[in-house]
């Protein structure tokens, strides 16, 4: 085949059609495996020939990357982790030797926020950007977005590819795009006013933010069910859209239906984990765009359909910075379900509901305990140990409280200054953490020695959500 | 002619070329007037035939909008103000009868933040969006941006078309786009880290933000001259890039050159006021893209070249929501200068340096005294009068202090509660104002009767800048 595939930028299905590409979406899974293998051969050979990183990473692989003969052979290539990407990008900044095109052909730069040390950088070519738009248009079509409908994107536009991915898909589909963003002071009140005025058909945000928007609307005397007119909401960034209570709360608040989406930023087009308008919970795996395998978190061996494991993702049409067998660290269960949409993809029936490692997601922001430890250990007032308490605030927004010990001498002198002394110290901790993490946290000060020490892996996270 | 014009989306000049379109940019101004008239005839006739608003607005015009015979005839059409746009959009939400295309053909929705009451909404078609990209690419070319260079956009992506306009122009030109955004907690520190890692050639931001970025970098031990490598910066949203001291401060801080740009959000492509890499101060008027006339602020009669007046702007290729003879409320001076770039456009030699009305721009955000008055008058603690003090903070960031009277009874009871009582009240005023204005302000409380009352137009703004 010709790799990467070319798509007709003018193509849009008839509005009544259930599928953007009925053949690819409803074909027999065994037949689809041939489509996948064909694209995979092109992608892997291309990476082997153009990426200094993969050339090195696969040098001792038990199979020939230039001539993969089966999906089973492919599964014998090594798994790539975020840490390996980070190390490579640090050694060869900014993209690492993942980049298979000259740097001056990079069309867009995105990345992760990097609160856990060095951020991850994504260089995306124009061709890849267009294919991301094509893939997302196709998946948004399944979610029920149609040309002429207005899509409001209420998530921050910055490094984060969630908002941009939603935008480029809606653009390609021919929707009216309303890239409102989020995150500035007073912006949610403005979002209420604008949603009431524009009456978008669809919203992209995080589930937490949607509920916050509904609450803000009610405080302003606006009824989110009748005054907005949202017909559907599609989400990524948090598991909420496949958490039944959260999903129900959003559907009740707005009188709309909810679609869960999202793999990882590195894997953009990230909608290839993506529900349709019929699926009550979970996400189909759009295997012919990004190929996903579930593996055992410990052994990393393939998991049978019906089982639980860590999704490992592979780009099938990325010419700029392909991720091949990329370890997500997430936990999900995959099954073949008989969805009324007729798609024959495997489905993550409960969405993504856990993490194999300990990363926290606080209001859509990745927060690593290791980063908090880093920050605390950089403060001379720190007393040596800490705990992280994660709770649900007002039922749905996640709240992180950092309980931190204060060194004996500081504790004593702050105590002498009266309650104001400890308050000032607490504010200082809080501001430093907020600055470093990019998300607000609460801080509680404790005297040195308050928490148990261990020589093993400390259990510092107390998760009170659920 | 065929209106609106079509552009070849694949066209890019040779990198050594000074001009994107040498013929249009360097032609004799008299000859250009013919080009302008030709486009203007198309634009005005189109608006007359497709916009219910203009059909009504021009019904008693002394000239025939369907058959304009000269630029002089055109200048006899009425001037359109922001207030008229607002009233029309309120009556016919959301776009008003400005929209000349079916609403489902709107590709992008943007607008003003609307801190002065109802926001203004811009509906933009796909064709217009592409032409905005074409115009901005052409003007960014003049500013010295070239394909393959990286353009970092450090301004918030939301309703504001400044950031989006910079992005779409850089995309069309073939630059590597890095849409970083701004405005979230800790984002400036992240901007420093990323700029150091990515080393962009160009920055788009507001002048204030550029200086803040330099200061933040220095605090982090990063040298903005050597560690970033910015070659040029282009700005809009504030007059700073044509204010010599500000311009010099930025050029010194980063070791780059500065280009001033920007007309108004309503007029997007807003870069048609746009400097080139040779111009030391001010902006060329790209008259064949948006046609600009200077008029007397009082009489609204045309101002001769060399004089000072209010720019009145007219779209020449906007099919969605054209603004025709749109009153900017800004003050500028226009002259014919012999720029080394060879362009034969008139030039706003000192940029835009004043406002005909009293709108304040605080850190890039429009703040209307009338809106502050609105907010204060909604608080029962308010004592009846107030003053607004605008100062330069740390030399370049604008700081707004609201000095507000507190009613006698509240003042007395807060006073009884000790200093904490007044502090809590001050914080309450501050938070309410920040929420309403979308920008942080300082608040000073004064007893009732502190400020002089007048029956004439109150002079409430004390501007300590300059």
Image (cartoon, coloured by chain):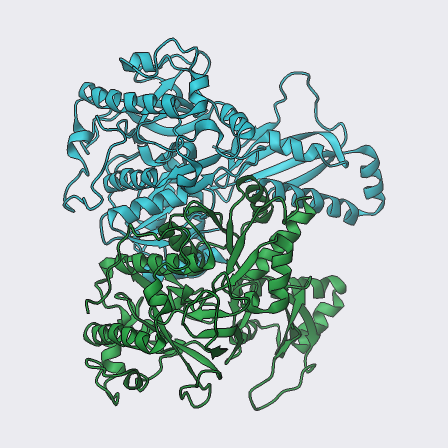
Chain colours: A green, B cyan
Give percent across and percent down for residue A266.
Answer: 38, 68
Residue closer to the observer: B392 or A194 = A194
Above or below, A359 against A186 in this view is below
Q: Position of residue B337 (x, y in %)?
A: 24, 25
Nearer-the-camera pick, B424 or A341: A341
Residue A215 in sight: yes
B223 relative to B248, above or below: below
The residue that appears at 19% across and 69% down in the rendered structure is A1
Instruction: Kindly indicate the quadrant of the structure image that contains residue B208.
Output: top left
Where in the figure is residue A31, as x and y percent of width and height?
Answer: 30, 76
The image position of residue A238, as x and y in percent, is 53, 66
Q: In this figure, what is the number of numbered marks? A: 0
Q: Quadrant of residue A114?
A: bottom left
Residue A280 versus residue B163: which sits nearer the camera? A280
Quadrant placement of the C terminus of chain A: bottom right
Lateral position of residue B24 relative to residue A151, left or right: left
């Amino acid at each position: 085949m010709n790799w990467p595939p070319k798509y007709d930028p003018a193509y849009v299905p008839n509005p009544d059609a259930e599928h953007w590409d009925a053949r690819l979406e409803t074909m027999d899974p065994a037949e689809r495996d041939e489509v996948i293998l064909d694209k995979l051969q092109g992608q892997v050979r291309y990476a082997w020939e153009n990426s200094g990183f993969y050339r090195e990473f696969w040098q001792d692989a038990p199979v020939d990357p230039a001539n993969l003969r089966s999906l089973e052979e492919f599964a014998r290539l090594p798994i790539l982790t975020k840490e390996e990407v980070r190390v490579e990008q640090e050694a060869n900044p900014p993209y690492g030797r993942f980049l298979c095109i000259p740097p001056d052909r990079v069309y867009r730069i995105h990345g992760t926020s990097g609160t856990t040390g060095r951020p991850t950088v994504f260089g995306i070519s124009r061709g890849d950007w267009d294919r991301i738009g094509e893939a997302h248009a196709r998946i948004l079509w399944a979610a029920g977005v149609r040309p002429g409908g207005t899509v409001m994107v209420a998530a921050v536009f910055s490094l984060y590819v969630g908002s941009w991915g939603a935008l480029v898909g809606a653009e390609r589909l021919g929707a009216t795009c309303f890239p409102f963003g989020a995150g500035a002071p007073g912006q949610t009140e403005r979002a209420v006013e604008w949603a009431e005025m524009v009456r978008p058909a669809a919203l992209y945000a995080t589930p937490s933010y949607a509920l916050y928007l509904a609450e803000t609307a009610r405080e302003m005397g606006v009824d989110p069910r009748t005054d907005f007119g949202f017909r559907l909401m599609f989400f990524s960034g948090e598991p909420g859209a496949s958490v039944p209570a959260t999903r129900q709360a959003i559907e009740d608040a707005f009188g709309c239906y909810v679609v869960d989406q999202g793999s990882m930023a590195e894997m953009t087009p990230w909608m290839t984990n993506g529900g349709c308008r019929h699926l009550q919970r979970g996400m189909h795996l759009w295997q012919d765009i990004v190929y996903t395998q579930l593996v055992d978190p410990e052994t990393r061996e393939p998991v049978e359909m019906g089982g639980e494991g860590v999704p490992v993702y592979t780009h099938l049409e990325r010419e700029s910075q392909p991720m091949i067998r990329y370890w997500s660290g997430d936990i999900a269960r995959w099954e073949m379900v008989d969805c009324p949409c007729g798609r024959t993809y495997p489905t993550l029936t409960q969405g993504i509901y856990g993490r194999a490692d300990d990363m926290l997601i606080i209001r859509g922001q990745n927060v690593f305990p290791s980063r908090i430890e880093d920050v605390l250990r950089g403060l001379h007032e720190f007393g040596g140990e800490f705990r992280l308490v994660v709770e649900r605030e007002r039922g749905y927004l996640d709240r992180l409280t950092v309980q931190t010990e204060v060194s004996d001498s500081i504790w004593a002198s702050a105590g002498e200054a009266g309650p104001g002394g400890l308050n000032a110290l607490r504010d200082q901790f809080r501001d430093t953490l907020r600055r470093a993490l990019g998300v607000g946290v609460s801080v509680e000060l404790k005297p040195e020695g308050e928490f148990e020490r261990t020589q093993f892996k400390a259990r510092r996270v107390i998760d009170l959500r659920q």
